Image: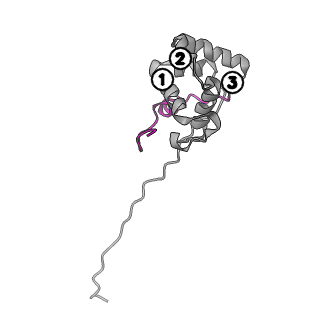
Amino acid sequence: MLGKPGVRCAVSEWHWTTGTKVPPDPDDEQWEEVLEVLRSYFTKRHFTSKYDIRIQFEGMLHRLRHGLSWTDMPLTWGPVNPIRERHLSWWQKGAWPEVMKALDAGIDGVGAYQRPVLPQFTVTGQFRDRGAR
C-alpha cells in the first residue's frame, strides 16, 4: 500500500502554505547543489541505490507539479515505492526545504498542484401541501 486514502501529503501542504514553487528539473550544476545539501543530511549509504537518485528526484518534482497520488505515478522515474520512501526520508530529516532553497524554488518554478475546491453547495426548498391546490 502506498498511502492512506484521504491523507494529505505533508510536502504538498508545505509548498502550499509557504508558497514555495516546485522548480524545474535541475541541470547538472543545480543537481550538484542538491547533492551537496543532501550530503549534509545523509550518510554515503543513502546514496547507494540501484535506482538513479536524480531520476527519482525528477519524479518527485513531477508528482508535485501535477498533483498525482503515488498510486497514479507512471513508472517513467522507476518503481514508485522507493521514490516515495526517499521523498519521505528527505522530508522527515528536513532536507526538502533546503533542497528547494538551493534550487531557488521561491523564484523559479510553478506552484504545487492543488485540486480546485468547489464552493459550498446548499439546497433549499419548501414542502407544499399537495391537498392545497
Q: Give the left or right position of residue 56, taking residue 6 as reference.
A: right
87 up-or-down from 98: above or below: below
Q: Which mark lies nearer to you, 3 or 1?
A: 1
Residue drawn at x 46%, y 38% as measured from the top left: 2
Q: Which mark lies nearer to you, 2 or 1?
A: 2
Name the secondary structure under disc 2.
helix
Mark 3 → mark 1, Cα distance in angstroms: 20 Å
What amino acid type should be assigned to the residue bearing mark 2? His
Q: Which mark is drawn over residue 46?
A: 2
Residue drawn at x 57%, y 35% as measured from the top left: 79
* Rendered location of residue 4, percent (x, y): 40, 41
Q: Are marks 3 and 2 in contact (CB under 8 Å)?
A: no
Mark 2 → mark 1, Cα distance in angstroms: 10 Å
* Rendered location of residue 119, percent (x, y): 46, 53
Q: Which residues are magenta?
A: 1-25
Q: Give the left or right position of residue 55, taking residue 45 as reference.
A: right
Label located before the other in sequence (2 or 1): 2
Mark 3 → mark 2, Cα distance in angstroms: 20 Å
Name the secondary structure under disc 3.
loop
Q: Which mark lies nearer to you, 3 or 2?
A: 2
Residue drawn at x 32%, y 89% as measured from the top left: 133
Name the secondary structure under disc 1.
helix
**For this rendering, which residue is in front, 45 or 57?**
45
Disc 3 marks which residue?
26
Label located before the other in sequence (3 or 1): 3
Disc 1 marks which residue?
89
Residue drawn at x 59%, y 35% as measured from the top left: 111
Q: Are marks 2 and 1 in contact (CB under 8 Å)?
A: yes
